[in-house]
Image (cartoon, rainbow, N blue to C red):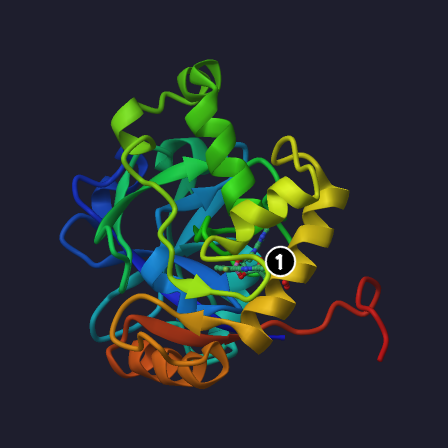
Amino acid sequence: QEYTLIKLQLVEPLPESLASLSGRKVFLVAGTLRPETMYGQTNCWVKPTMQYGAYEVDATTKDVFICTERAALNLAYQDLSSKEGEAVKVGSVSGQDLVGRLVQAPLSKYGQVYVLPMLSIKEDKGTGIVTSVPSDSPDDYAALRDLRNKEAFRQKYGIKDEMVLPFEPVPIIRTPTMGDLAAVKACDEFKVASQNDAVQLAAAKEKVYREGFYEGVFIFGPHNGGKVQDVKPIVRQQLLDEKLAAVYYEPENKVMSRSG
Ligand code: ZZB
């Protein structure tokens, strides 16, 4: 699986446990299959109960990526480490300590967005960090809606209203049957009640992927009017050229992978 790794730079001050990295560029890195949707980022997701590592990925710049250890190892084999073939760990931070922090989200309409909790993040997929596009990702819409609607849920994780309430889903792609906020429509149609509705969310995601990719047209940003299929490689290349993203290959998990 080839992902695009989106680099979301942490805005200082850094969390206590990463204070020694102050002055360096520290990025939360999120694996995505849909780099063309980055205009619609409203937040970044971490799993509060998970432990993340901080890894030095460049011997010259001393830049740091925050991700799972598993992802850091994969990155080290892909030339993204200050030591060849070896992950160089320079710190550790819990998901909960990242919650409520500001990051710069490349291309996002909102510029800077907050790190928020998502409970369904898988530890063994991507980097363990996910960037959130609630307009076009049903999982993201469901998780953001849980936070927006439930004050108790926000309180539990120490999230202030201003980290969530101003960040409406952004209409970026128009689809023929699901309108301009395909993920919102799909969550409705498949009766997704919360971020824990795994079965309904899988069906919603499948439909949004399919219609978004094959029939979607941009209604936002510099590629307004362009087909998603055509715009996707252009935006991806732009992100890579501007060093706002990197390429990340995930080795197939032999046991879990579907055949064919
Ligand atoms: C931004 C985005 C925008 C995404 C969208 C999807 C969509 P898949 O299809 O199952 O292979 N993701 C990445 N890592 C994790 C993780 N560790 N745990 C949970 N979710 C994760 O999944 C790839 C997508 O799953 C990635 O692409 C990421 O969300 C999320 F408009 O990034 B995506 C219809 C989907 N739309």
User: Relative to 184, does residue 239 appear above or below in the rendering?
Assistant: below
- Residue 157 position within the rendered picture, expressed as x and y whole percent measured from the top left: 43, 22
Q: Where does the image place residue 17, in percent across and percent down from the top left?
A: 31, 36
Q: Residue 260 at x, y = what percent?
A: 84, 80
Toward the viewer: 146 or 249? 146
Q: Nearer the viewer, residue 93 or 118?
A: 118
Label 1: which residue? 125
Q: Could you tell me which residue is drawn at 69 percent across and 60 percent down?
A: 206
Q: Is residue 65 visible?
A: no
Q: Position of residue 230 (x, y in %)?
A: 45, 86
Tell me the residue at 62%/32% (across/down).
Answer: 194
Q: Is residue 208 above or below residue 225?
A: above
Is 257 on the left or on the right of 78, as rendered?
A: right
> Does mark 1's beta carbon lie closer than 8 Å to ligand 1?
yes
Looking at the image, which residue is at 40% across and 40% down?
Answer: 93
Disc 1 residue type?
Lys
Q: Name the quadrant containing residue 96.
A: top left
Q: Is residue 238 visible?
A: yes
Q: Residue at position x 38%, y 55% from top? A: 171
Q: Which quarter of the rendering shows the N terminus?
A: bottom right
